[in-house]
Amino acid sequence: MTPGPLAPSLLLVKPAGADCNFRCDYCFYLDADARRGASRRRMSDEVLERMIASYLALDLPVHAFCWQGGEPTLMGLDFFRRVTELQERHGRPGTVIANSLQTNAALIDDAFAGHLADYRFLVGCSLDGPPHLHDRRRRSAGGGATHDLAVAGLRRLQARGVAVNTLCVVHDTNVGHAREVFDHLVGLGFDHLQFLPCVEFGPDGAPRPWTITGTQWGEFLIGIFKAWRNAGMPVAVRNLDAVLQRLVDDRPGDCTMDDSCRQYLVVEHDGGYYPCDFRATPAWRLGDVMSMNPAEAMATARMLEFGAIKTPASPDCPPCRHFDVCRGGCPARRNPREAAGREWLCAGTLAFLDHARGSFEEMADGIRRAHRDRA
């Protein structure tokens, strides 16, 4: 069947579920059993093939798979050889397949890097800055430092010519060190960066220790913006690109800047569909790959209900001077203690856009003029 307007632009696949060789303090995904290492989650070959076949049967310009976790490389190289074999088998002539892998990179050896290079995977390496900032919150299962393990895997990927970028979680330890983090990541050879603010609430609604404040987030983004401008802009920063894209053609460059929450599907190790990385819970299970294809999962009543969570936003949002850009932010970051509260990082987003929007508007005008001149 054709996908219709609700076909997912991306499948975010967690083949090993929450299982991971690291024990990062801030990982929202790990439950108590996973933290103790008591569980083992692995996607079966039956689920894998059904997922790939049903997704590739949809008529889409690009079929995008993002392999994530937990830690997806726990599946081993043979699993990813099977992934590309099945994609070749089920892809129709002209099918465009994009694979990305988000990893801590510690388990990447030369053979693994070679396969990722051969099939043009985009690999995101998780690094939170230099060792004294990264290792504070990102520890191995045995409690050891992980920065050097990640960099060793990165070097193997780079040696094979794999396209790499980095995802940096911004938490209580590194949030005050924007320039140091930026310089370290660029110094490692990354030219595409993404910064993910750490916002987690406990059962009582109180922010967890590693959660940053809106003020801290704003100062961090301003620091990154200044570092980016001072560097002559040879580096792409997704957080900045998303603002620019919204101003250039009014399209969301990030799911938090969209008008609804229906951009992608999460596929868990058991084949279950979920609407969001932050809502992979039994209450939000949409169905599974053995009983429906991704377009059908996107059209379920539960998915439509989830998409509508973005609205209504706080009453403060629509008249806000920057609502046209941020669109109210991420619902998962709303303060659970406030029924109609603003997004937790709202004050920081406002401060950042107050500082940088004029520059982004000038850049957007230049891009539009260049497009008109070429037309």
Image (spheres, helix red, strand yellow):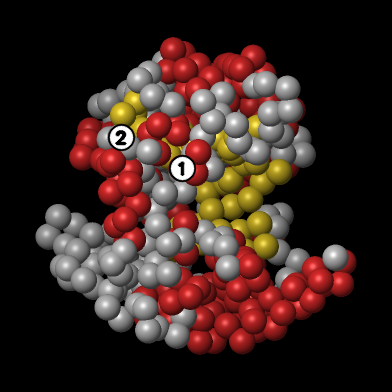
Q: Residues within 10 Å of mark 2 (few under 14, many from 20)?
A: many
Q: Secondary structure at mark 2?
A: loop
Q: Residue furthest right?
A: 374
The label number, if any, that marks residue 6 in the structure image: 1
Looking at the image, which is closer to me, 16 or 338?
338
Q: Quadrant of residue 371?
A: bottom right
Looking at the image, which is closer to me, 85 or 209?
85
Q: Secondary structure at mark 1?
A: helix
x and y percent of residue 124 in the render? 58, 45
> Considering only vertical position in the picture, is 195 above or below 247?
above
Residue for point 31% across, 29% down? 287
- Observer able to see residue 138: yes
Q: Quadrant of residue 89?
A: top right
Residue for point 51% across, 81% down? 353
x and y percent of residue 18 in the render? 35, 35
Residue for point 31% across, 64% down? 311
- Observer able to see residue 104: no
x and y percent of residue 180 in the render? 58, 70
The amino acid at mark 1 is Leu
Q: Quadrant of residue 19?
A: top left
Give the side of residue 29 with respect to residue 193, left or right: left
The amino acid at mark 2 is Leu
Image quarter in which the C terminus is found: bottom right
Residue for point 43% across, 69% down? 327
* Mark 2 vs mark 1: in front: 1
Q: Residues within 10 Å of mark 1 (few under 14, many from 20)?
A: some
Give the side of residue 276 with respect to residue 85, left or right: left
Residue where numbered disc 2 is placed: 286
